[in-house]
Image (cartoon, rainbow, N blue to C red):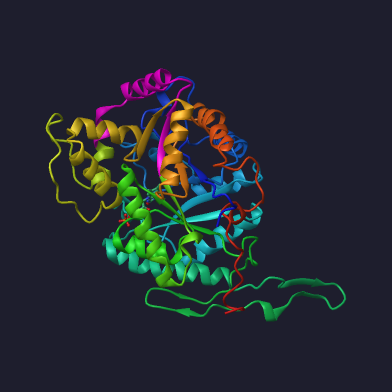
């Protein structure tokens, strides 16, 4: 997958007001996720840092109690289409739900983005764990495993639609007046348990052949879907040994689907709080934590755990909790950490307030690079999904202070060697399986 020697892949998780729940209160931080200028600036920083990928999440409901960027934000595909025009290399990834969309629409929008961006589109296929979305679609939120059964077929239909056009189908033959070679476009004619889709799309084969598929589920059916279909997986981690076990377990599922484990990049989410010195980094984290509002942090924690913790005594130790169907990845990892480290509810909500349940590292550039290197070389990941606590400063610090250390150590590219996301990830461009089975 990667060039020799093996190098990291880096993505950036974009929330305009910062990944930290109170990042927007940090002096100089961006104030809005409804601001194209903010996202364009993030695009420029990502390309200066030679990042593989920018990622925009989505929830299909406004959640003002949790995080300012969950309250008010643009529809991610619209935002990425605008960003495609002001960036040239960085991959552009966004979430689209397999529970509240039709595969035809998802296939079409990501195929269009792949054309618009010259081969940089990536789809984060999520099943939508948040029940609030159901109210916006006049639906009853399906159960967890039922959502994944739909997702399995949904992803196949999307990929099938992307394969309906072979390369070279548009011939533009002025002599004969033929624009398209009809032998190179076919319907999909999919008739499955959940979807009936004829195809083809009104969008020709895309620069990447198939846009990249991202996934972030960590339940049993989530891992099965990722092992079969994902190119990149965002992992939730808090502990090196756990991350190594999760990495090995996911990759070991791939050969059963005829896939080489090296064709999947596992990127754990990490919030780096960087200072020029350890003391400066610590002070930054303390400042950010002093801005955390208890109500927001408790709603975020309740949502991540799938259990309403708002009435729990803050200074009591976190007990073993039966976790409901709606939580999974974040909940399991956070609860394991709380029990391992004998945390109180207050400790856990501080942690969730900081990075929404993701891993936080704080320090000077060298020590942050040491930790990332250790994880990468220990077989815990193929790179990282970076969650800057606030933008643009928190991302500038990572790109200008930590990335050069990683480059110096040969762990990360100094220049892009290709122009598509597939090339950054070291993945081959697939041929259409409809035409070349
Ligand atoms: C980095 C990361 C980004 C995610 N982005 C989204 C998102 O944008 N929208 C969403 O509904 N779920 C998102 N999720 C949630 C997962 O995709 C998944 O739905 C959730 O973990 C439940 O799946 P599971 O039960 O298989 O773990 C994200 C998770 C992670 C770790």
Residue 316, above or below 189: above
| Residue 60 makes an appearance in the image | no
- Whole-percent x, y for residue 208 in the image: 62, 61
Q: Main secondary structure of the magenta part?
A: helix
Report which quarter residue 102 is drawn in.
bottom left
Residue 87, above or below 99: above
In the rendered image, the quadrant that contains the C terminus is bottom right
Q: Residue furthest right?
A: 175
| Residue 2 makes an appearance in the image | yes
Horizontally, residue 238 falls left or right of residue 168, namely: left
276 or 331, which is in the foreground?
A: 276
Q: Residue at x 22, y 45 (%)?
A: 336
Which residues are drawn in magenta? 269-298
Examine the structure image and report whether residue 66 is included in the region drawn in magenta. no
Q: Residue at x 57, y 75 (%)?
A: 433
Q: Residue at x 66, y 51 (%)?
A: 419
In the rendered image, the quadrant that contains the N terminus is bottom right
249 or 27, which is in the foreground?
A: 249
Q: Residue at x 61, y 57 (%)?
A: 114
- Whole-percent x, y for residue 98 in the image: 40, 61
Horizontally, residue 119 falls left or right of residue 323, namely: right
Residue 292, above or below 427: above
- Whole-percent x, y for residue 233 in the image: 43, 54
Report which quarter residue 354 is drawn in.
top left
Examine the structure image and report whether residue 283 is included in the region drawn in magenta. yes
- Whole-percent x, y for residue 311 in the image: 13, 35
264 or 150, which is in the foreground?
A: 264
């Amino acid at each position: 997958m990667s060039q020799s020697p093996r190098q990291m892949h880096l993505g950036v998780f974009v929330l305009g007001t910062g990944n930290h729940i109170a990042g927007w209160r940090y002096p100089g931080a961006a104030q809005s996720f409804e601001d194209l200028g903010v996202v364009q600036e993030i695009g420029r920083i990502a390309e200066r840092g030679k990042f593989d990928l920018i990622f925009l999440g989505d929830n299909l409901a406004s959640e003002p109690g949790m995080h300012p960027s969950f309250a008010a934000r643009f529809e991610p595909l619209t935002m990425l289409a605008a960003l495609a025009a002001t960036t040239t290399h960085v991959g552009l990834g966004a979430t689209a739900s397999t529970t509240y969309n039709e595969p035809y629409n998802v296939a079409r929008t990501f195929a269009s983005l792949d054309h618009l961006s010259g081969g940089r589109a990536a789809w984060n296929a999520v099943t939508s764990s948040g029940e609030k979305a159901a109210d916006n679609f006049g639906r009853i939120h399906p159960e967890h495993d039922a959502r994944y059964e739909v997702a399995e077929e949904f992803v196949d239909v999307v990929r099938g639609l992307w394969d309906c056009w072979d390369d070279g189908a548009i011939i533009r033959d002025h002599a004969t007046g033929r624009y398209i070679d009809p032998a190179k476009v076919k319907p999909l004619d999919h008739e499955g348990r959940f979807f009936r889709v004829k195809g083809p799309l009104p969008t020709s084969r895309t620069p990447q052949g198939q846009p990249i598929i991202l996934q972030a589920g960590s339940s049993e059916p989530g891992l099965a879907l990722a092992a079969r279909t994902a190119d990149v997986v965002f992992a939730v981690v808090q502990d090196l040994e756990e991350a190594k076990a999760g990495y090995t377990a996911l990759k070991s599922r791939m050969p059963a689907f005829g896939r080489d484990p090296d064709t999947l990049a596992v990127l754990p989410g990490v919030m780096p709080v960087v200072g020029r010195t350890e003391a400066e980094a610590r002070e930054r984290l303390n400042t950010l934590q002093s801005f955390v509002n208890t109500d927001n942090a408790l709603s975020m924690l309740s949502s991540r755990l799938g259990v309403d913790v708002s009435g729990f005594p803050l200074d009591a130790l976190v007990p073993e909790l039966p976790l409901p169907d709606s939580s999974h990845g974040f909940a399991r990892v956070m609860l394991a950490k709380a029990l391992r480290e004998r945390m109180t509810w207050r400790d856990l909500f501080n942690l969730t307030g900081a990075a929404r349940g993701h891993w936080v590292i704080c320090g000077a550039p060298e020590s942050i690079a040491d930790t990332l290197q250790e994880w990468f070389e220990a077989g815990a990941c193929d790179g990282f999904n970076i969650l800057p606590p606030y933008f643009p400063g928190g991302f500038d610090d990572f790109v200008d202070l930590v990335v050069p250390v990683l480059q110096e150590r040969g762990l990360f590219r100094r220049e892009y060697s290709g122009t598509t996301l597939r090339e950054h990830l070291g993945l081959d461009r697939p041929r259409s399986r409809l035409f070349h089975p």
